[in-house]
Structures are given as structure tokens and as C-alpha cells.
Image (cartoon, rainbow, N blue to C red):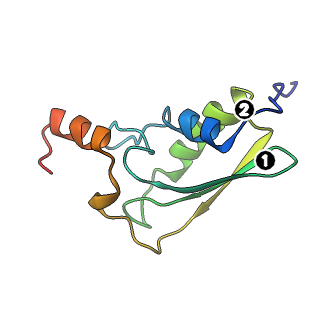
Amino acid sequence: MSQPTTSASTTTDDVLAALGEVIDPDLGINVVDLGFVYHVELDDQHIATLTMTLTSPACPLTTVIEDQIRTALVTAGLVRDYRVNWVFSPSWTPARITEDGREQLRAIGFSL
């Protein structure tokens, strides 16, 4: 199977925008608006390194999220490959949720 062609002009902002398509399976909200993405870095080999967190280190859905990341970044041709550094310090808190994320959570019944 051939690799998708990657864009040499891809920026970290492009990667972050694409991560907006990655949905947390528990909440149905994207990982960017939930505040799970701490940092995005692109190297000269066009590999994205993502520093991310989850609400809990014991989350069983990391593989599902990583599969969605692969689709959003590699399959879409934005990057050649990616790595996720899962970190839990600093701990995720609801304060990291964007205003858009808060509106989406309120729409499904969460009070923030």
C-alpha cells in the first residue's frame, strides 16, 4: 500500500486544526476543545510529535484516539507519521476546556 503524499507546507496550526476532527469517544467532543493537546511539534522529516493528556492515565480509549489521529494526520496527507507522548503532569482539569468545548458539553447536559 502506498503512503499518502504529505504537504511540505504543513504547519503546527494545520496539525492542530486537523486534531479538531479527533473525537473523544466518551464525550463526543474533540480533543482540542477538551484541552487534551498540550503541544504540537513538526520535525524536518514531517513527523508530528504530539504531547497530549487524557482525563485519566487509566483511560482505555488511547488506541481509539490514536487511530483517529492517524486518520486525521497521516491518511489525510498532512504528515508522514506521528508520535503521541501521553503525559499526566500537569494533570488535566476542566479549566483546559475551550469555550467551544464548554458550549458543546452544556448542549449534551453537562453543567460547567
Task: Please name the residue shown 71% across and 28% down the image.
Answer: 75
- Residue 46 shows in this picture: yes
Front residue of 63/33: it is 33
Task: Please name the residue shown 56% across and 48% down the image.
Answer: 63
Residue 99: give x, y in percent of width and height.
Answer: 28, 43
Residue 88: give x, y in percent of width and height.
Answer: 47, 71
The quadrant in which residue 15 appears is top right
Task: Say left or right for 56 vs 76.
Answer: left
Residue 78: give x, y in percent of width and height.
Answer: 72, 32
Residue 2: give x, y in percent of width and height.
Answer: 88, 24
The quadrant in which residue 1 appears is top right
Tag of residue 81: none
Front residue of 52/57: it is 52
Mark 1 element type:
strand
Amino acid at pointer 1: Ile
Task: Say left or right for 35 vs 1.
Answer: left
Look at the picture and state if 90 lies above or below 82.
below
Tag of residue 78: 2
Task: Please name the residue shown 38% across and 43% down the image.
Answer: 33
Amino acid at pointer 2: Leu
Task: Please name the residue shown 50% across and 31% down the image.
Answer: 21
Look at the picture and state if 40 lies above or below 70.
below
- Residue 108 shows in this picture: no
Look at the picture and state if 112 lies above or below 81.
below
Q: Residues within 10 Å of mark 1 (few under 14, many from 20)?
A: some
Q: Name the residue under label 1.
A: 47
Mark 2 element type:
loop
The quadrant in which residue 74 appears is top right
